Amino acid sequence: MGSGRARRRLVWVLAAAVLCAAVAEGQSRNRRLRGRVKVDGSSTAAPIVMATAELFRAEAPRVQVTVGISGTGGGFKKFLTERANLRTDITNASRPIKPAELKRAKRLGVEFIEIPVAYDGIAVVVNPANDWCTHLTIDELRRIWQPGSQVKSWKDVRPGFPDVPLHLYGPGTDSGTFDYFVETVVGRARACRGDYTPSEDDNVLVQGVAGDRGALGYFGYSYYAENKDKLRLVGIKVGDRPPVKPDPQSIRDGRYHPLSRPLLMYVNKRAYQRPEVRAFMHFLLKNARRIVEDPRVSYVALDERLYRAARERLEAGITGSPLADPANRGKPLEQVYGQP
Amino acid sequence: MWTWLRRLKERTIYCWLLACGLVSIVVTVGIIWVLATESVQFFKHVSLWQYLSGTRWAPLLEPRSFGILPLVCGTLMVGVGALLIAVPIGLATAIFLSEYAPGWFRQIAKPVLEVLAGVPTIVYGFFALTFVTPKLLKPLLPQTEVFNAASAAIVVGIMIVPTISSLCDDAFRALPRSLREGGYALAATRLEVSTRIVLPGALSGVVAAVLLALARAIGETMAVTLAAGMTPKITANPLESIQTMTAYIVQVSLGDTPAGTIEYQTIFAVGMTLFVVTLVINLIAQRVMRRFREAYE
């Protein structure tokens, strides 16, 4: 009896082992990948990479992808640390790399490949009870947000607006969204008035604007999209053209200007040689449209051709940042990245 | 041979205990050293006068400005506001526990007060943000902002009630019973004995308790960071968003300011200011405590 049971157990174990081996044979190559991919940077772009990391885990469960949200500036600092073994492999950015950061990369010998992954618009929002402001010009925004601004009430914004106290909400100084908005609206880096309510957490900004009748705030479009019932969009009027409100279409075709921008990823060229990093980036670019347009991420996906061009850029190892050159910034992305 | 070994053991234990005792001194000196050296770097670029008298604090924005008064104003608003809440409640609690309450009540109330003191401060901050502001302040005063000094002052006040009440309670109990009995013998009511005999008699202890509680409220970090806001400004309106010195240090430390820049050095300058202020308050409180101890011994 004893040996019979033991023999039966052995048979089961052997069968299970054979089954496992067969299953393992049939896995895709990705499943055998192991390693770490370190990503950090913009909190605006992070949801895309985080969603990719989640999906990628199903493909390559042994690859550990960590995504930090130190902000665009903080991400570049971690991308370009003095000690090579502390550097991140990929950094997300909601603005192109700055000249000072480029210089540092050159000094440290860090070669990177810049690719676009999505478009984002900065949504300017007001409280739903605000029924007087449907659009603002960039000039009005500048007068509101510039340093030393004395605009304390809506009536100072435009004659005809009621005398309701104006309360401002926006990202803090570490945010790439802050950098981009201030440089675009006011014109100089970090030139912003100090008496607004800053927060790195966009959810706090949503709560602030939603709870305050005289509030005006700005943050990435996806946070508006998630909270449409609590906020009202303000159209942006440039010159004589009719005001444009941000939505996926107007962001992609450039009508929502100048507050739409590409979200970028900078990949360390040496890190890209590692199979897990390469597999991760290929996975991201192959599934980019699906990931970016998922309602939980809700950015504006690029054209498929651009994703393919980005992949070719990575494969060819074309280093440097085309968008660091201000002349390239107004051009459509197909022109900037289109030629591999 | 055994005496030699024993002497060695005694010596080793002595050295070890001495080292442990020195750790606290070394750490204190180390903290002061770090604060001082980095602050000196800061004051090479910004004059002390500009720092102490400027009314605009904007080290991270252009154009830069390093006047600390807005942060001091914010800190004082929260500190004084907290005292306004904590002193009446704490004092009344202490008087009740020492003069009025039956023994069994004291047995229950004292541990409960300790629990209040033991709640982590970040929970208080969270409580301010999600309960005090939206459910208490906004319905009563609709112009309250999402972040405001009042909700921070309220929760910090609740936080320091146990400090005040237990220190005042100790001060009251230190008074000899004969003082109270003299009052009762002269047909004074319990209220008269509490307010006219006990309270003035223990006044220096009460003042010391209030000062220590103020020092704690000024140094409070997490609750104000969550609840009071990040907008440095000089204002008298507690319903607006302000920034305290502690919240500013949190903001810059958690951000991506590179080491060695002047923005980084502001952390140490503000930290030094905070340290000096709380040190002065604590020294005054100690002086007052010593005086109160001498009077009845």
Image: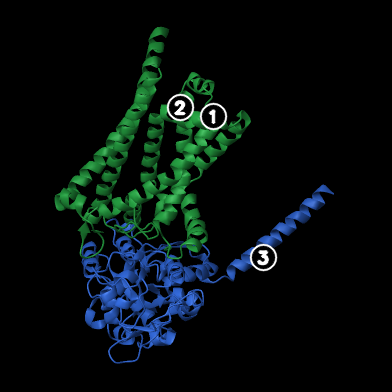
Chain colours: A blue, B green
Q: Residue A254 versus residue A38: which sits nearer the camera? A: A254
Q: State the image coordinates of residue B219 (x, y, percent, origin top left).
A: 36, 44
User: Label 1: chain?
Assistant: B
Whole-Å distance between the Cαs marked 2 and 3?
Answer: 88 Å
Q: Write down the residue under mark 3.
A: A19
Q: How many C-alpha atoms fall within 10 Å of the one at disc 2: few (<14), some, or many (≥20)? A: some
Foreground residue among B165 and A226: B165
Indicate which disc residue B197 carries.
2
Name which residue lies at 30% across and 44% down: B274
In depth, the one of A164 and A89 nearer the eye is: A164
Distance from disc 3 to disc 1, alpha carbons, whole Å, reads 90 Å
What's the residue at 44%, 41% (across, down)?
Answer: B87
The reply to whether callout 2 and callout 3 are in contact (CB within 8 Å) is no
**Type of amino acid under label 3:** Leu
Q: Residue A315: in sight, yes or no? A: no
Using a 10 Å C-alpha cutoff, classify the residue at mark 1 as few (fewer than 14 neighbours), some (14 to 19) or many (20 or more): few
Specify whether disc 2 shares its chain with disc 1. Answer: yes
Q: Residues within 10 Å of mark 3 (few under 14, many from 20)?
A: few
Disc number for residue B189:
1
> Callout 1: helix, strand or loop?
loop
Q: Identity of the amino acid at label 1?
A: Thr
Out of A237 and A118, give the one closest to the viewer: A237
> Could you say where residue A312 lies in the image, as x and y percent from the top left?
36, 80
